[in-house]
Amino acid sequence: MDETTQARMRARIEAILADLADEDRRGKAGQATVELDQQAVGRLSRMDALQNQAMARAGQVRRQALRQRLLAAIARMDEGEYGSCEDCGEAIVEGRLALDPAATRCMSCASG
């Protein structure tokens, strides 16, 4: 992979990481402990709050997993291994990396 493409991919990964950090900050409120609100409509409002809390936590888990994959991609860049399939060693096509900058396998290995 040429340096220009790799620099563009690094910038994209860093932008995604920044977006994830912003989402984490916004998601903190949704993960707060659900408190019993006597003024609310009752069980349904508490159930909604619990569901929202569970969804916020699930989102945090997904963001953390993506963050780990993206940080691993940056580490592969630093090691000069970014863009090479971890299974067969062939180049991962740029289109695949554009869709998933953390991809570690070429299409042949990923589908087979």
Image (cartoon, helix red, strand yellow):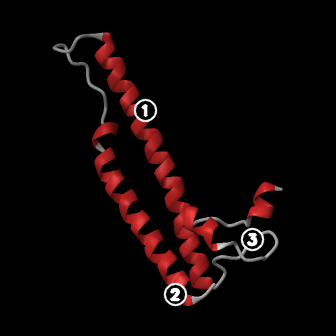
Measured Cα–Cα span from mark 2 to mark 3: 22 Å
Residue 112 against residue 40 in the figure, above or below: below
Determine whether, in the image, residue 60 is placed left or right of residue 40.
right
Name the image quarter holding residue 31: top left
Residue 9, position as x, y percentages in the image: 51, 75
In which quadrant of the rendered image does the N terminus lie? bottom right
Numbered circle sitting on residue 65: none
Determine whether, in the image, residue 50 is placed left or right of residue 79.
left
Measured Cα–Cα span from mark 1 to mark 2: 41 Å
The residue that appears at 43% across and 71% down in the rendered structure is 14
Q: What amino acid is at disc 1?
A: Ala
Q: Secondary structure at mark 1?
A: helix
Measured Cα–Cα span from mark 3 to mark 1: 35 Å
Q: Secondary structure at mark 3?
A: loop
Task: Answer few, some or many: residues within 10 Å of disc 2's Cα (few below 14, many 20 plus, some between 14 and 19).
Answer: few
According to the picture, the residue beneath numbered tag 3 turns out to be: 86
Numbered circle sitting on residue 4: 2
Answer with mark 3 or mark 1, whichever residue precedes in sequence.
1
Q: Count every numbered label the image shows and give the total.
A: 3
Name the image quarter holding residue 22: bottom left
Q: What amino acid is at disc 2?
A: Thr
Q: What amino acid is at disc 3?
A: Glu
Answer with mark 1 or mark 2, whichever residue precedes in sequence.
2
According to the picture, the residue beneath numbered tag 1 turns out to be: 54
Residue 79 against residue 48 in the figure, above or below: below
Residue toward you, 32 or 70: 70
Residue 79, position as x, y percentages in the image: 62, 84
